[in-house]
Image (cartoon, grey):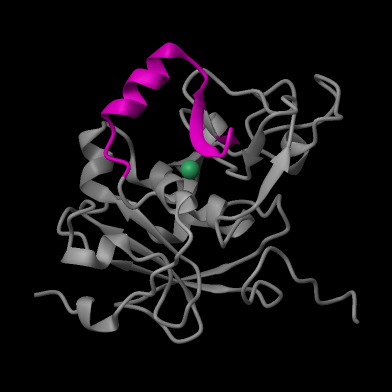
Amino acid sequence: MSDTHPTFGAFNQGEVPTIACFNQASTPLGVDLDALNVAPVWATPAKLVKSKGFLKGAWAMVFLDDADTAGALAYHDLTPDGLPESKVFVKTTLDNHDLVSVSASHELVEMLVDPAINLMTTGPDPKVIYAYESADPVEALSFPVNGISMTDFVFPAYFEAFHKAGSAQFDQMKKVRKPFQILAGGYQIIFKNGKWSQVYGSAAKKKRFAREDRRGHRSEQRKRRDRIRANPKQIARG
Ligand SMILES: [Zn+2]
């Protein structure tokens, strides 16, 4: 096997995946999708293209108003070809006083690291399995790329419990000191006692999380066994 053509998480990631980004939200995005090219720290390059809908052979990032948009559209998990798809809920994001660019870069980096939403690892607590979600633990922080706010995200060393505090870079903004640390505004998805749950970086985050509409998010998808493909007919905006 050639080592010049690596295969990453899953799907067709051995190729550099194309991600079709299209807007089904009636709310203006207020963000240029071109700015979403997050540095490939995880060695997971991708090519983002703007489109009017799903593209054959491409992954997708769909912008929707909220989880009720276009009926079941918000609840599917894969493109019509069975490739990774992520959703950004524009109205929900703005209602939460968050930025669309931060939500979109959050989804993008997590999709590239764990496209099938099924990677997990052991960590500091021997009774717990930790989900490979690369933006959640630091999700309250963002940094500007060409003047547009992008989410902070953790580095591979974050999920490697053997690193000593301060011995490696654990996140893009260098705010995380040690593996599996959760910053005040962040959280982690864990599997414990046969169930998925969350641990929070602060009591304030726990409260805020409980108020959020989480339908259609990766945390909900992770709990389910099935993966629903999108139906192209539902895409035609009525
Ligand atoms: Zn996330």
Residue 5 seen from this side: yes
- The quadrant the N terminus occupies is bottom right
Rendered view: 114 above or below 237: above
Horizontal side of 66 relative to 77 (left or right) equals: left
Residue found at the far top of this picture: 203
Q: Which residues are magenta?
A: 190-214
Rendered view: 104 above or below 63: above
Whether the magenta-drawn stretch holds residue 208 is answered as: yes
Horizontal side of 27 relative to 57 (left or right) equals: left
**Point 75% across, 25% down: residue:** 124
**Point 49% across, 78% down: residue:** 58
Q: Position of residue 164 (x, y in %)?
A: 86, 22
Residue found at the far bottom of this picture: 56
Q: Quadrant of residue 63?
A: bottom left
Q: Position of residue 62 (x, y in %)?
A: 34, 64
**Point 71% across, 52% down: residue:** 42
- Which sits in the foreground, 32 or 69? 69
Whether the magenta-drawn stretch holds residue 96 is answered as: no
